[in-house]
Image (spheres, helix red, strand yellow):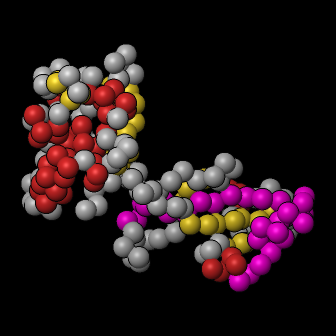
Amino acid sequence: MKRLLYAAAGLAVIAIAPTGPKAQDAEWGCQILLCAASQNPSWHGVPYCVPPMKKLIAAMSKPGFDWPICHQAKAGEPGREEFEECPAGSHPASSSNGDDHGLRRDEQDQCVRIVDRCENRNEFNRLYGNDEANEQGRITVEVIRNGRDDSLLRRDDGCSVKITSPRARRANPWFFDIPNDKGVKERFWFNLRT
């Protein structure tokens, strides 16, 4: 609830009762912003947030949809990041050319990293030595040799290995960056599942 109050600080035109801001008293864009910023519980658990959020979800499927903006909050439209960050030492990459699994051509749904399997064979074998576990986890292990994947080549002795694994999808892929009472933007993640 504290984070919701911070989010509401920038909404000067919203009626603020002694118990805090009321999303149902705001314009639709501000209702969306306040409800999306609700973290514990999420908007799904706040009774007055369910109608405006369901209205938003229905409106998004219609042609010509424009996101309702809460101009008073200076937050603009939300952003969206479908995938979690890759683990340290990895970078995002795309596994698709856009033809399978409903992925867009530019969707970076994989994490790729280069490891030296010779440096610590026991650790490498513990993490990636089980082909069945790799297959279940959709992890690929590719030895980098001269003439293959030269941009990632470290040396031509078979020690450098390219590890590719799926990126986790975010439970809450949408976000608003909302200025707090000090003007510093704070990120609030939310989802639009009903």
Between residue 83 and residue 2, name the one nearer to us. Answer: 2
Q: Which residue of the protein is positioned furthest toward the top in this rendering?
A: 182
Query: In this orientation, which residue lies closer to the viewer: 150 or 169?
Result: 169
Q: Is residue 73 visible?
A: no
Side of 10 where 154 appears, left or right = right
Residue at image position (83%, 65%) is: 124
Occupied quadrant, residue 175: top left
User: Compared with residue 16, is residue 102 higher up or lower down, i.e. above or below?
Assistant: below
Residue 56 in percent (x, y) is at 15, 52
Give the magenta range: 104-132
Please provide percent x and percent y for residue 182: 37, 16
Q: Position of residue 87 (x, y in %)?
A: 63, 52
- Magenta stretch containing residue 37, yes or no? no
- Where residue 37 sits, quadrant-wise, is top left
Q: Indicate whether 63 appears above or below 40.
A: below
Please provide percent x and percent y for residue 108: 48, 59
Residue 22 visible: yes
Q: Looking at this view, is 76 or 13 the one in front?
A: 13
> Please, which residue is most extreme toward the bottom here?
132
Q: Quadrant of the C terminus?
A: bottom left
Q: Residue 115 magenta-drawn?
A: yes
Q: What residue is shown at x 34% (from left), y 18% (from top)?
A: 181
Residue 123 sits in which quadrant? bottom right
- Classify the position of the N terminus by image quarter: top left
- In percent of the image, x 13 and y 52: which residue is there? 51
